[in-house]
Image (cartoon, grey):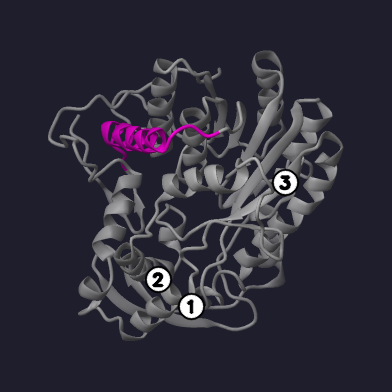
Amino acid sequence: MIIEPRMRGFICLTAHPVGCEQNVINQINYVKSKGKIDGPKRVLVIGASTGFGLASRITSAFGSDASTIGIFFEKPSSPGKLATPGWYNTAAFEKQAQEAGLYAKSINGDAFSNEVKEKTLALIKEDLGQIDLVVYSLASPVRTDPTTGITHRSVLKPIGAPFKNKTVDFHSGKVTEISIDPCTEEDIQNTIKVMGGEDWEMWIDGLKAANLLAPNALTIAYSYIGPELTEPVYRKGTIGRAKDHLEATAFTIADKLSDIGGNAYVSVNKALVTQASSAIPVIPLYISLLYKVMKAEGIHEGCIEQIQRLYSERLYTGGNVPVDEKGRIRIDDWEMRADVQAKVAALWEEATTENLPSIGDLEGYSNDFYNLFGFKVGGVDYTADTNEVVEIPGLQA
């Protein structure tokens, strides 16, 4: 079939398998170009099919020759029906991993559920014995608590007062004012339930109880802080409360791992175009301005560059892992440089529909968004008849 992008609001409803595959190959080639990392050899990635999770799996496998198990919740392909991009990404990754002689297996299901946890533990026990690194990179708007059976939904809202500021529709380039009403206390608690650290801790508890964590095992989860511009709706809003919980959970997990010489970290990563961030008001405008500044400075990074630097310059240097005053790894250090933020803030004040194409990088933002779904990837013939049915080689039944 001929596959084209089909949009509904801020979501692309289609994905291109060849474009997704090329995206994965590009990331693999980047990691290979940076040389080997003396990193983990057996890695579990929870949320492994897109974004930072996918980049973590690629960096583990092709940077450290690691055996990897990936957990995700994606829609498979069938004749006449496209899969989600994460499905195509994983199929491409596993194909490349197998060709390189690397172990790679995957489980497709709800990572919040006891069923998927038990299935994962059984696979680790049978195939790998123990795990050296657990990457927790889930980005879901909904979670059903396996203990209570209650389904919780996260919200993106400010706390205490309405939030008003600029935003941009990255499809049209139109800059407008938006207003978001404040949340309720129930909104906060639901968002913490979905995006906080409870499920991360449950995964580690299960792995440790089953003796599946190797001596000196590490676990890492990903977070974001961002600038003052986005604080009211992000870091000081409902999602910020969830991130606070996630970051606090790292200390709890670290205590639990101390008897095996292990540790737990949260890495604060850079603002990037993801399916989640595209739906957050204000963020697309901020990212388009940030990209312009960071590209001009020669310090722009995507997911794979961020994670490769995290592994090679933070987690696996052979020395102490550098952290900030709150115990967090800061791989957003280039984004949050004072000179970068000052330039972005100045551009923000003058941003309009008319001047954004010149003062921002809306094209870069848009291209990155389409790339997430396998579109606008260099070297791909989008006029060619494409087989939509793609299998994941190591998918567990």
Answer few, some or many: residues within 10 Å of disc 3's Cα (few below 14, many 20 plus, some between 14 and 19). Answer: many
Answer few, some or many: residues within 10 Å of disc 2's Cα (few below 14, many 20 plus, some between 14 and 19). Answer: many
- The numbered mark, 1 or 3, whose residue comes first in the sequence reads 1
* Residue at 45 percent of width and 59 percent of height: 277
SS at mark 3?
strand
- The numbered mark, 3 or 2, whose residue comes first in the sequence reads 3
Q: Name the residue under label 1.
A: 229
Q: In this view, does 226 lie to the left or right of 5?
A: right
What amino acid is at disc 1?
Leu
What amino acid is at disc 2?
Tyr
Q: Distance between the residues labelled 1 and 3?
A: 30 Å
Q: Quadrant of residue 43?
A: top right
Q: In which quarter of the image is residue 319?
A: top right
Q: Name the residue under label 2.
A: 286
Quadrant of the rendering where the C terminus is positioned: top right
State the residue in front, 330 or 376: 330
Q: Is residue 320 above or below residue 44?
A: below
Quadrant of the rendering where the N terminus is positioned: top left
* Residue at 43 percent of width and 76 percent of height: 339
What amino acid is at disc 3?
Ala
Cβ atoms at labels 1 and 2 below 8 Å apart: yes
Q: Name the residue under label 3.
A: 264
Q: In this view, does 143 lie to the left or right of 281?
A: right
